[in-house]
Image (tube, coloured by chain):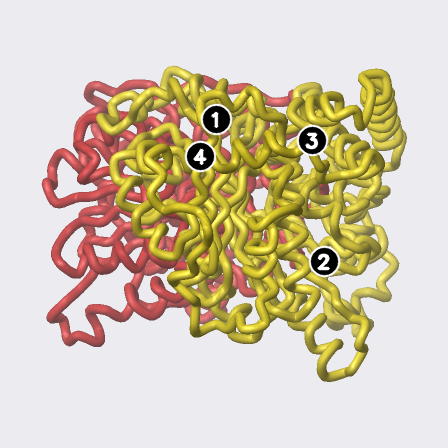
Chain colours: A yellow, B red
Amino acid sequence: MGRMGFSPKHACLTDEKDPNRQKITNLTSCLLVSCQLNLHCEVRPPFSSKFPLPFFPSLPIGTKATKMSTAFSAANFSTQSFPLNHTSTTSHDSPLVFAKPTSQFLRSTRKLRLSSSSKLNLNRRSGTVVAVSDVVKQKKSKSTPTLLITKEEGLELYEDMVLGRAFEDMCAQMYYRGKMFGFVHLYNGQEAVSTGFIKLLKQQDSVVSTYRDHVHALSKGVPARAVMSELFGKTTGCCRGQGGSMHMFSREHNLLGGFAFIGEGIPVATGAAFTSKYKREVLKEADCDHVTLAFFGDGTCNNGQFFECLNMAALWKLPIVFVVENNLWAIGMSHLRSTSDPQIYKKGPAFGMPGIHVDGMDVLKVREVAKEAIGRARRGEGPTLVECETYRFRGHSLADPDELRDPAEKAHYAARDPITALKKYLTENNLASDAELKAIDKKIDEVVEDAVEFADESPVPPRSQLLENVFADPKGFGIGPDGRYRCEDPKFTEGTAHV
Amino acid sequence: MALRNIIGKRIGNGIGLVGRRSLSTSTSDVENRNAKSMNLYSAINQALHLALETDPRAFVFGEDVSFGGVFRCTTGLADRFGKARVFNTPLCEQGIVGFGIGLAAMGNRAIAEIQFADYIYPAFDQIVNEAAKFRYRSGNQFNCGGLTIRAPYGAVGHGGHYHSQSPEAFFCHVPGIKVVIPRSPRQAKGLLLSCIRDPNPVVFFEPKWLYRLAVEEVPEHDYMLPLSKAEVIRQGSDITLVGWGAQLSIMEQACIEAEKDGISCELIDLKTLIPWDKETVEASVRKTGRVLISHEAPVTGGFGAEISASIVERCFLRLEAPVARVCGLDTPFPLVFEPFYMPSKNKVLDAIKATVNY
């Protein structure tokens, strides 16, 4: 095989010996959206199944909505003063909320649970804590629920997520058949983040991703054919076959890559955001409101580059959104065991930007938060840090046997599959029928099959491509022993010149 | 005779010996009592077990080491020695190495793992500016000799740009650290133990291609191999070949092929790149009069350049042909084009013939 495989018998399952680890039995799913100006701590009670997704359908209406929007667009929002005691009409002392301090973080190792109550108290100093009972009453009083999306938007989101899922599943198949090779990292389970954010962008907005970038590319508009060919290493791929799985680039769609190295893309995104701001303010292209999104994982949030860029972006008020796809695991290292304060969104305010935590398994919630964050950036109000709590259903890469994660944890998140959830939302709210959704499924299957066929039939890059693009000017290879430029040597195009 | 058995898939797809055969080195610098057949990552694992056992102030840390590491080199260590000595770090190479320097400065043995050599660049500043200069600039009051940085390097067949690099040349340019690269399991265990116990900071690159493919009889006891001592693993009289790490197996094959054409090749494993054993190589070149150097890193500025310059300085009048270097091309390590990029057996063979027939 020659692949970097893992043999199960050598796995060291230190997880099981961790005394802090508790089983996941009765996790309540909850959305905690907190920013420096407002804290909404909504604990979904155990009877959550009665409520359709998302939990925020009332958000655009009512007091909470205005608070949410003021949080982002407050004219007096400055980096220095955060009104810490912003009060609201709701009570702080709801016993229900106090009684369930562990709700906002669903994690497999329970170290956080032990101290989370204290953390929650800290958070609450800024806060409007909405009692669950109030919310329930508000909901019931409305006669018709207001929906977050229209039918077209819903179908678009659904299609994008299904495309992501089907594509990744096909990647796995192709990998095990030997058509694709190298290190391939799949995005199953995290589609809501990609779809929720990227579908709100224009073509000129930029996206910077990680090695788990197939679905970001697809959401941004890179054709499935181009991505599949790139994975197969063919010339028709989006990078002419030279990047592979971890390096998807697209000039046309402003996808600034796929970065194999964690955190390497964040400074690149920061620079891209600066360009946009520069164009608008210095070059006076008034309509240039291009936003950059930087996606990265939880492990990256312990890396120096992340902090450096948070600082620069906040300092210069760049139009960028930092999206953390917190899937709890950095290969085999649990986020909770490697981070002093696992609540990543709190790192935003430390640098002077709002930090938001959102349920990344729910595309509608992500979309709402994304709207605000991207809107903020477009209006020139600066960066935002959004932490999406999400999960990858597969291992870190296709070579990872994925033995370290608790099956109960996996099952918990599998039950919150974003695609199933959206499907349920669409059907329950009569936005789409089962038949329409099935038609989309079928269409996507055909798209993916077509992509595979196209990639199969595409030619392999010629050998001459090996020496191309090392320098901008091929004369960069200098002068050969025969006194002529090496690039003028006919062998250069054959890839056999001695360089 | 020796190294071809560890080729496995390295030659081409499916050709060649998918080896779990034992490998014998040509010198018996280690006694063979209680030798057990094992592969590279097991040998390294054993070395780490011994290092932690013999020194209570030794630590192993890095990304994902506690479950065994992505290459299984650190399996069993956390269980045996506890989480206080074998632990995961967050994903920050600069922090990992700097932290290791601090540990070493206080007299501990810090064995830091960088998950892939390609990721070592954020730590480059700490290694070059701190680790290499610690003893020097403190006037020998402090040193970080207890620091050993282990990183898997080299091509693996499907690694692409960021899982296949060979950065040894960058570190060879830094006075104050040592760079060591083993070629096989038995060598790896001995060399790693020497590196850990050496009173200087060492960067230990492990050829990741050989983690599973190289199988050899490795003695189970604690043994150390000397650093800065090159080894002649194949005797010859027509040309000297110098290499290190996984590339030696390719060169070995080329030597065997060249043998059929009547060219007798002498193959030298450098083992330690800095400070490298100039005497052994010089003696060999004085014998043969020709030298060829081969490594996976790009040819321009690779370590082969240093060897070439030094040999020419010392043996100019003895040389019968220019020093040949068969190395990777001057491009980023490619993904699809890896077979073209690599200094393959045929390229080495061509160069041997060209040099001998100069």
Q: Amino acid at mark 3?
A: Ser
Q: CA distance from mark 4 to mark 2?
A: 35 Å
Q: Which residue is mark 4?
A: A43
Callout 1: SS: helix
Q: Quadrant of residue A375?
A: bottom right
Query: Do marks 3 and 2 share a chain?
Result: yes
Image location (x, y in percent) of residue A260: 58, 47
Q: Amino acid at mark 4?
A: Val
Callout 2: SS: strand
Which chain does tag 2 point to?
A: A
Marked residue nearer the N-terminal end (4 or 2) = 4
Marked residue nearer the N-terminal end (3 or 2) = 3
Left or right of A91? Residue A321 is right
Left or right of A487? Residue A385 is left
**Residue count near mark 3 (Cα–Cα under 10 Å), binned few <14, some 14–19, many ≥20:** few
| Residue located 42% across and 66% down the image | A83
Label 4 vs label 3, nearer the camera: 3
Q: Which residue is mark 2?
A: A206
Tell me, for residue A143, which label it has, or none. Answer: 3
Q: Which residue is mark 1?
A: B213
Callout 4: SS: loop
From the viewer's perspective, is residue B233 above or below residue B279?
above
Q: CA distance from mark 3 to mark 2?
A: 41 Å
Which chain does tag 3 point to?
A: A
Q: Nearer the viewer, residue A73 or A134?
A: A134
Tell me, for residue B227, which label it has, or none. Answer: none
Q: Amino acid at mark 1?
A: Leu
Which chain does tag 4 point to?
A: A
Image location (x, y in percent) of residue A278: 70, 77
